[in-house]
């Protein structure tokens, strides 16, 4: 299939007469979709690539000025999450004849500067095409970055308005089809030998499965390794779904938003095999999770810098190839027999917790956990849940039961509010045979809801469950955990807030919508939503004060060193005590 599935475009004077004219002439070869917000259309493109394990991607073109700068947040999200995204923003005139042009950032000390410089630090590859023939070298390099498993990330090719419209005699060979294969390098023999020695000496090993397991399509190899050698598997946000939730080696989410099972095992592990994870602070509980002072790490990763984190023995290579090589070389070795037995008991205990906290308690204002439990029970095994930022990702990471790879799509690398609806649209375009459920809070919905209208326009159905807790409930809870009083987060604490009719708003954007009260009504509405022919929004009021107490681990959020508040001073003392538990290096 074509590597680039199509182009998201919002046209302005900086791209309509150049790129826009070209796209209009080739709708069959390269589809063009109209969006409502540049950041959102880039989110949709990112989600599309993530849902397809980085095997295909989309491009985005914008005008100069605000159209281009609206891409910065999405580009940062793609960079953090190592996802391919091709950005084609317009730029000012190379000739400078009409300078300063509309929307030009006029810098008197550097006349060549434009707002597209803001995309440099969030791009894996950046170039400004000042002459058409520069594409002969720049475009192949851009495609190499977009398809390389280690370098993968956003690419920006800034296109000045006058250069966009110029003709040039490209060699026909430049347009010959080129095949892209997934590069699957095996590990260096010396690194493999050192890793094997560590594994053979381990009695209580734990695997952390990150997003790289899914991108390498290594879920089957991971399952075989875990089963053959009796090693429990914990999952990061990006790696959730690497194993089915009820697999005998599965111990659930790990870290700050982790299960009690995974975190208990992490505390006792003598070796951690980190597969395809960049070990961010939520995964490691800000480096406090692994309590055994002798615990050692192996970093199996396609990216060398990730493989060496936390003083790990690096094992640079493709996850599927390298796990298979490790397993073959470890024939006859397994973890201590009682280690997996303990893991399975811990997981049974955790599943009891999940059943309890996700059940309908009959509360007038249900918890996030109860809402996601209703969606999980109703959605079916093939469904995909989409979310980002706030309290919902933490509850989903702990509690969502994922049965298939790519059934869990939560953006928590950049934790970007506003990703949810646009991301759901991208997932639906990537996986048209699977139902897509977007869980979004009222705060994120108000930030970026425009692509709900795009989903209706394109016939890409989403089921949207909007949890209205009247503000930023997650940060309100964090504020109080840090000793602060409620301030500027919930609408009630921020001045007289409006009574927003979210269902009416969604209907105005073309979706079907209704508001429900309680979990029983929600479950009936979810059945109606499944039968609907277009995007369907269900609004439910939830309790902003409640989150799942079970599971989880410490997260380093610095607390004010001096305060007149006794509660802040106590929170600071707790913070300093937790700091003493952090591993060094």
Image (spheres, grey):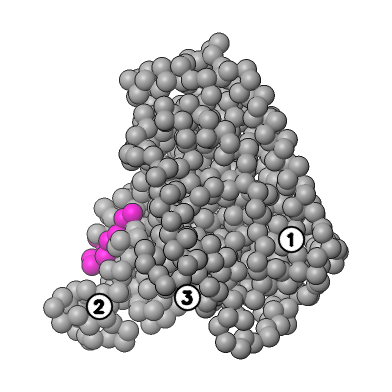
Q: Earlier in the sequence, mark 2 or mark 3?
A: 3
Give yes or no for contact between labels 3 and 1 (Cβ–Cβ under 8 Å): no
* Pointers 2 and 3 in contact (C-beta within 8 Å): no
Please name which of the two marks, 1 or 2, marks the residue nearer to the observer.
Answer: 1
User: What residue would you read off at disc 3?
Assistant: 10
The numbered mark at residue 93 is 2
Q: Residues within 10 Å of mark 2 (few under 14, many from 20)?
A: many
Element carrying mark 2 = loop
Left or right: residue 284 compared with residue 242: left
Q: Give residue 495's mark.
A: none
**Residue highlighted by disc 1:** 371
To which quarter of the image does residue 468 belong? bottom right
Left or right: 34 as drawn, with respect to 154: right
The magenta span reads 124-133
Residue at 65% in and 59% down:
547
Q: Quadrant of the C terminus?
A: top left
């Amino acid at each position: 299939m074509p590597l680039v599935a199509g182009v998201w475009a919002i046209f302005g004077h900086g791209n309509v007469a150049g790129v826009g004219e070209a796209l209009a002439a080739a709708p069959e070869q390269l589809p063009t979709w109209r969006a409502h917000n540049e950041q959102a259309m880039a989110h949709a493109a990112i989600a599309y690539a993530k849902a397809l394990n980085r095997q295909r991607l989309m491009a985005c073109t914008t005008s100069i000025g605000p159209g281009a700068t609206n891409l910065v947040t999405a580009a940062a999200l793609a960079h953090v999450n190592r996802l391919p995204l091709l950005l084609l923003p317009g730029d000012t005139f190379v000739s400078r004849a009409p300078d300063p042009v509309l929307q030009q950032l006029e810098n008197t000390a550097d006349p060549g500067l434009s707002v597209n410089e803001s995309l440099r630090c969030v791009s894996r590859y950046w170039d400004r095409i000042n002459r058409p023939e520069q594409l002969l070298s720049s475009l192949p390099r851009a495609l190499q970055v977009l398809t390389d498993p280690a370098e993968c990330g956003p690419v920006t090719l800034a296109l000045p308005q006058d250069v966009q419209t110029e003709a040039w005699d490209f060699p026909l060979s430049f347009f010959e089809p080129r095949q892209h294969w997934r590069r699957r390098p095996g590990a260096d023999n010396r690194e493999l030998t050192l890793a094997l020695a560590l594994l053979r000496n381990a009695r209580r090993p734990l695997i952390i499965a990150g997003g790289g397991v899914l991108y390498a399509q290594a879920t089957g190899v991971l399952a075989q390794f875990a089963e053959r050698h009796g090693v429990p598997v914990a999952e990061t946000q990006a790696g959730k779904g690497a194993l089915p939730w009820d697999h005998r080696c599965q111990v659930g989410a790990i870290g700050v938003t982790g299960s009690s099972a995974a975190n208990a095992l992490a505390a006792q592990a003598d070796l951690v095999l980190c597969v395809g994870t960049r070990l961010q602070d939520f995964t490691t509980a800000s480096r406090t999770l692994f309590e055994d002072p002798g615990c050692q790490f192996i970093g199996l990763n396609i990216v060398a810098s990730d493989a060496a984190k936390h003083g790990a023995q690096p094992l640079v290579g493709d996850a599927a190839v390298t796990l298979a090589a490790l397993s073959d070389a470890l024939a006859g070795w397994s973890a201590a027999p009682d280690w997996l037995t303990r893991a399975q008991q811990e997981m049974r205990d955790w599943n009891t917790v999940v059943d309890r906290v996700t059940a309908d308690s009959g509360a007038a204002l249900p918890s996030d956990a109860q809402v996601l439990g209703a969606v999980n029970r109703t959605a079916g095994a093939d469904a995909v849940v989409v979310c980002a930022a706030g309290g919902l990702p933490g509850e989903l990471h702990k509690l969502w039961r994922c049965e298939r790879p790519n059934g869990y799509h939560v953006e928590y690398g950049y934790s970007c509010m506003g990703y949810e609806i646009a991301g759901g649209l991208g997932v639906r375009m990537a996986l048209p045979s699977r139902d897509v459920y977007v869980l979004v809070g009222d705060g994120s919905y108000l930030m970026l809801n425009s692509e709900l209208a795009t989903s209706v326009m394109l016939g890409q159905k989403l089921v949207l469950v909007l949890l209205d807790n009247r503000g930023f409930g997650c940060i309100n809870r964090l504020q109080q955990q840090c000793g602060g009083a409620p301030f500027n987060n919930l609408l009630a604490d921020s001045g007289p807030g409006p009574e927003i009719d979210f269902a009416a708003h969604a209907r105005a954007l073309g979706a079907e919508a209704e508001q429900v009260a309680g979990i029983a009504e929600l479950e009936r509405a979810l059945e109606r939503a499944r039968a609907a022919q277009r995007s369907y929004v269900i609004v439910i009021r939830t309790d902003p004060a409640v989150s799942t107490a079970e599971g989880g681990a410490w997260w380093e959020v610095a607390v004010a060193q001096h305060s007149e508040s006794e509660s802040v001073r106590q929170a600071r003392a707790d913070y300093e005590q937790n700091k003493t538990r952090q591993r060094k290096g």
